[in-house]
Image (cartoon, coloured by chain):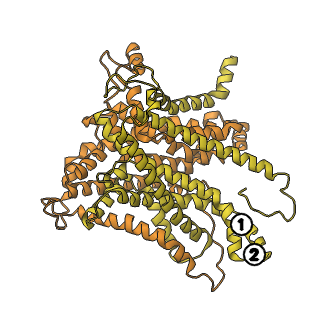
């Protein structure tokens, strides 16, 4: 988790704080922390506890008649059973988008960090700039790009990559493309931060020792960019798995991810126990994936 | 042969530029659509060139109301999260105290939690506590998810600061308050400004958390979401393009200012007795 925690700061965790002058300001740090910590406890920790309670409400209750906490653990298997395909899709689409994003994002981060010279800052701004346009407006623009009457679909039909009636919009391809696009900068920025610190002389040394470019990449560049790679993949994967905007705007109910189901459980069907159980299942599943991934990535780093 | 050498040297850069093109493609489409008169309300295709959307950005008043509301919420969330986040950052970098691990975890976890869970858990809290959802519940939620990002950003700036400047001021009989006002604050300010801008953009663009906690309040992203089903007014693309332009302008201005400040600072950098006033 430290890899993620360092993110945004771009610098490694700072060393131990300076020793406090004895006797003075003993209460000051707590006073400084109080408003922020209280806010996070009140509006992050307590709500999580409330969500946990809601996931164990008697499922036969309703918002109007009131819910009773009956420790109904059965809500969990029930919710999982009912929406297994949406769960699978969430992880499948996010995983596919992650692979695509790595193929696009690694060369981009590498080029900016190592090859851009004095254009570095400008190119970095170019990576972030598209995010300034609203997320939803950007996603709707993909609707135009992937439209059945659009240039792209026409081109793909002409070269027979798509059948005469083939479409991109309202298919899983569109949703995966949307996810890749929307979260790509989250992957590129930490990766850039890692690659920027890469000493170019190491690659020259590898070349002097007769390593081919591919071998040098595998044994020098890739291992050294690991912290950024790990932070970037997590920063990409976590929001992508929980996203439902792309599935809603670019897909059809056949592409719905777990987020769409949770949204409708809370806001349309008003089935709070189910929505809460699904939220927790999503969080647990993401944490499990992250944990396994960090352990594996960690051991590879050691080897 | 020479072409292939040239390609081998530059393929990474070429791929990178292609990817940047891919990143900008939708922005170009948004800008293009802002100059388009759609053939029908549900059409997303180019039809006819017009400047009308830019001349009358508020042809759909509900949309402009939503933009104004998003700016208000963004402003309040930015002020709130920047103040309490900066205080936390100072405590974490400048002080020793018990429970540091717990506080770090408390700051880190909201960033690692899917937005969906942040949104639904707050909804569960507000509903069970009987708090009516609306403008203020959205502000509360936005402050909550912005704080962590503010702490991380300000912390980075504070940690990279040369403490000897403050020690020098104290040696020259500056009081603690004077040192803070004249040395510390100006030096940390760029970090605080960056954090505030980040908080504003996070708040302004948020859909998922807002959607669960807004009640009947409509922010700009929520307006777009609702309109996507009923038909999007082309002015939405005007707002998207304008946001992009304003953000680029801000980035450009801050780069210019930074460059000018650095140039101005250079000749006197070694002058003795220079008061450190401006951000470096």
Q: Which residue is mark 1?
A: B183
Vertical placement of residue A243 versus B233, above or below: below
What x and y, as percent, mark residue A23? Answer: 63, 86
Q: Which mark is residue B174?
A: 2
- Residue B232 is situated, as x and y percent measured from the top left of the image, at 35, 33
Q: Quadrant of the N terminus of chain B?
A: top right
Q: Chain of mark 1?
A: B
Q: CA distance from mark 2 to mark 1?
A: 10 Å
Q: Which chain is orange?
A: A
Question: SS at mark 2?
Answer: loop
Q: Is residue A83 left or right of residue B242?
A: left
- Quarter of the figure with the C terminus of chain B: bottom right
The letter of the yellow chain is: B
Assess disc 2: are there few (<14), some (14-19) or many (≥20) residues with their C-alpha within 10 Å of its C-alpha: some
In the figure, is residue A184 to the left or right of B122?
Answer: right
Tag 2 near tag 1, CB within 8 Å:
yes
Q: Depth check: A213 or B126 in front?
A: B126
Q: Is residue A209 visible?
A: no
Residue B272 percent across, percent down from the top left: 87, 63
Residue B217 visible in the displayed image: yes
| Secondary structure at numbered mark 1 | helix
Q: Residue at (62%, 37%) from the top-left corner?
A: A123
Is B40 left, or right, of A296 in this rendering? Answer: left
């Amino acid at each position: 988790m430290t890899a993620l925690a360092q993110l945004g700061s771009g610098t490694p965790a700072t060393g131990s704080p300076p020793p406090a002058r004895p006797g003075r300001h003993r209460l000051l740090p707590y006073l400084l922390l109080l408003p922020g910590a209280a806010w996070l406890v009140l509006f992050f920790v307590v709500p999580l506890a409330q969500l946990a309670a809601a996931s164990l409400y008697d499922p036969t209750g309703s918002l109007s008649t009131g819910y009773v906490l009956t420790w109904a653990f059965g809500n969990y298997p029930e919710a999982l059973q009912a929406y297994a395909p949406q769960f699978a899709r969430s992880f499948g689409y996010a995983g596919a988008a992650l692979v695509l994003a790595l193929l696009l994002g690694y060369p981009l981060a590498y080029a900016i960090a190592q090859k851009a010279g004095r254009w570095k800052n400008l190119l970095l701004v170019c990576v972030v700039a598209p995010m300034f346009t609203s997320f939803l407006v950007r996603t709707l623009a993909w609707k135009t790009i992937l439209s059945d009457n659009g240039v792209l679909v026409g081109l793909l039909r002409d070269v027979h990559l798509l059948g005469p009636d083939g479409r991109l919009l309202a298919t899983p391809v569109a949703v995966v493309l949307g996810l890749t696009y929307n979260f790509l900068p989250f992957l590129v920025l930490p990766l850039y931060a890692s690659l920027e610190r890469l000493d170019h002389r190491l690659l020259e040394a590898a070349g002097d020792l007769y390593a081919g470019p591919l071998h040098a990449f595998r044994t020098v560049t890739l291992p050294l960019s690991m912290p950024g790679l790990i932070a970037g993949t997590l920063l990409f994967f976590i929001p992508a798995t929980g996203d439902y905007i792309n599935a809603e705007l670019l897909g059809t109910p056949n592409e719905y991810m777990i987020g769409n189901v949770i949204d409708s459980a809370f806001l349309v069907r008003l089935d709070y126990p189910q929505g809460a159980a699904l939220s927790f299942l999503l969080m647990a599943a993401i944490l499990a994936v992250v944990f396994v991934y960090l352990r594996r990535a960690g051991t590879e780093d050691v080897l | 042969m020479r072409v292939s050498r040239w390609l081998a040297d530059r393929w990474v850069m070429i791929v990178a530029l292609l990817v940047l093109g891919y990143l900008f493609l939708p922005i170009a489409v948004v800008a293009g659509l802002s100059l388009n008169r759609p053939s029908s309300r549900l059409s997303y295709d180019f039809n006819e060139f017009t400047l009308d959307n830019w001349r009358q950005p508020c042809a759909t008043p509900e949309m402009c109301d939503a933009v104004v509301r998003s700016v208000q919420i963004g402003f309040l969330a930015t002020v709130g999260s920047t103040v309490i986040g900066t205080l936390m950052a100072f405590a974490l970098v400048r002080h020793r105290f018990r429970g540091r691990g717990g506080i770090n975890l408390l700051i880190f976890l909201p960033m690692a939690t899917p937005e969906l869970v942040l949104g639904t858990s707050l909804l569960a809290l507000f509903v069970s506590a009987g708090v009516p959802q609306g403008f203020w519940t959205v502000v509360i939620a936005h402050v909550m998810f912005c704080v962590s990002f503010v702490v991380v950003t300000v912390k980075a700036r504070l940690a990279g600061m040369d403490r000897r400047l403050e020690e020098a001021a104290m040696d020259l009989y500056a009081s603690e308050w004077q040192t803070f006002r004249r040395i510390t604050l100006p030096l940390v300010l760029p970090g605080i400004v960056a954090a505030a801008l980040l908080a504003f953009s996070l708040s302004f663009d948020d859909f998922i958390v807002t959607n669960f906690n807004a009640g009947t309040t409509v922010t700009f992203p929520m307006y777009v979401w609702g309109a996507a089903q009923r038909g999007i007014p082309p002015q939405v693309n005007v707002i998207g393009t304008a946001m992009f332009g304003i953000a680029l302008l801000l980035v450009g201005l801050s780069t210019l200012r930074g460059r000018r400040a650095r140039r101005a600072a250079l000749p006197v950098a070694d002058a003795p007795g220079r008061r450190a006033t401006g951000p470096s």
